[in-house]
Image (cartoon, grey):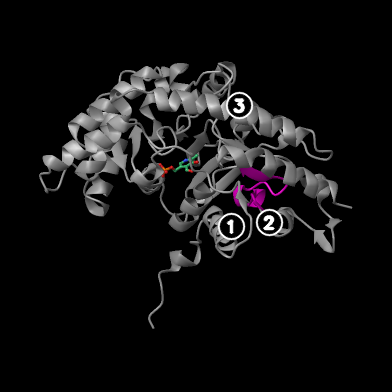
Amino acid sequence: MPQLAQRMRRAKPSAIMMIAEKAKALQASGRDIISFSIGVPNFLPGPHVYEAVRKALEHDSGQYGSNRGSNALLDAFLAHLAQVGLTGYARENISTGVGAKHVLYNLAEALLDEGDEIAFPTPYWTSYMDIAEILGARPKLLPCPPSQGYKLTPRQLDEALTPATRVFLFNNPSNPTGMVYTREEIAALAEVLARKPDTWIITDDIYHRMVFDGLGYSNFVQFQPSLRDRLVFVDSLSKTYGMPGWRVGFMAGPKAVADAVTTLNSNHITNLPEMTTAAAIAALSGPQDVTVARVADFAHRRDRVHAALTAIPGIACPRPQGAFYAFPDISAFFGRRHGDTVLADDVAFCAALLEAKGIACVPGSAFGEPRAMRISYTCPAEQLEPGMARIAAFCSEIR
Ligand SMILES: Cc1ncc(COP(=O)(O)O)c(C=O)c1O
């Protein structure tokens, strides 16, 4: 058989999907499993989205569409951007993709040559590393340990970015930590970025509407408007609107970048389907009540999860303020035993937790932070307390 391309040696399946699949398989075999593994919202979009799709079906053109996205979709996204204070963009600044993951992949192809440096804070969303590795870029990791609340400091950023850094990739609110940067923190990082003219900036802010405690969302361009020439904002319908399977993502940034992503679309996907486009426009422009209610629910869940975790002796967990993740530091248990099992590291801890208590969490090493594990708290409501109780019981049995 002929060989696969070299780059496939660097490509690996998503670690999160692998855990989620394992939990599903155990469930199918009759085990009582509570999955805190996959980051999918536990809700569906409002009825207006389905109504829009039904209407679109009646007028289906059956034709290819715009590589950038239909004008109506671009306008709906521009209005959505303006609502979070990102104004001054036009259709030419926007492009779309099959989810934010695809947009990020396209951006990496558009901005990075093989061997180029891409810097991002750690813990990071797993696909940042995977995409960089597939494309042969050189990741530069900026460690943000639990002791600094999993957040990047201006000093760290200043020291890390050199003229050789082609892309700085930032994620706020964060998957996996749920941390959200304050206005002051964003302003201070923006000031550093303004002094790094050779570096593209991507802000993957797909959870920007999922912020708790009245903290609000801020972007670097709001403090340093000059960054607009080299900053790309990435967004998605997946989490905000309970539409991960619909696969719609967006970018807003310099025209040259939006054009590049559109060119890649013309060679990869051609266009988003008409029905998906109709659903996306309805989600962005229609009532936002489902999202608002869900974010309020996630804030309550955060309280319960955080309280349960911090009550466990040995666990430390910076308080998340957005998205739907918690990222407790479990390293105090490493090297100890649960029954006959030695909990050597995060992977062993998560495997033993799944085996002993039927709780699926993702080892932190999938996100570049092997001291922790990720809990995604979007499970059915009635599973939340029992799930947390099982984690507490597991930890109390560790010797
Ligand atoms: C930080 C972050 N960016 C991007 C994505 C991808 O989102 P999409 O479903 O739009 O591809 C995810 C999904 O989990 C994510 O957590």
- On the image, the x and y values in percent for residue 164 come to 50, 41
The 10 Å Cα crowd at callout 3, few under 14, some 14 to 19, many 20 or more, is few
**Ligand 1 near label 1 (Cβ, under 8 Å)?**
no
Task: State which region is magenta.
Answer: 359-375
| Residue drawn where x is 74% and y is 45% of the image | 391
> In the rendered image of this protein, does residue 13 appear above or below residue 225?
below
Left or right: residue 101 compared with residue 272: right
Question: For residue 175, what is the image quadrant?
Answer: top right
Q: CA distance from mark 1 to mark 3?
A: 25 Å
Q: Is residue 62 visible?
A: yes
Name the residue type under label 1: Ala
Q: Quadrant of the N terminus?
A: bottom left
362 in magenta: yes
> In the rendered image of this protein, does residue 232 appear above or below residue 129?
above
| Residue drawn where x is 58% and y is 26% of the image | 299
| Residue drawn where x is 24% and y is 32% of the image | 73
Q: Which residue position holds label 1?
A: 23
Determine whether label 2 and label 1 are within 8 Å by CB: yes
| Residue drawn where x is 54% and y is 31% of the image | 173
- On the image, the x and y values in percent for residue 389 come to 74, 42
Q: Which residue position holds label 2?
A: 354
Residue 232's tag is: none
Secondary structure at numbered mark 3: helix
**Ligand 1 near label 3 (Cβ, under 8 Å)?**
no
Q: Which residue position holds label 3?
A: 300
N-term-proximal mark, 3 vs 2: 3
| Nearer to me, 387 or 218 | 387
Name the residue type under label 2: Leu
| Nearer to me, 105 or 349 | 349
Q: CA distance from mark 3 to mark 2?
A: 25 Å
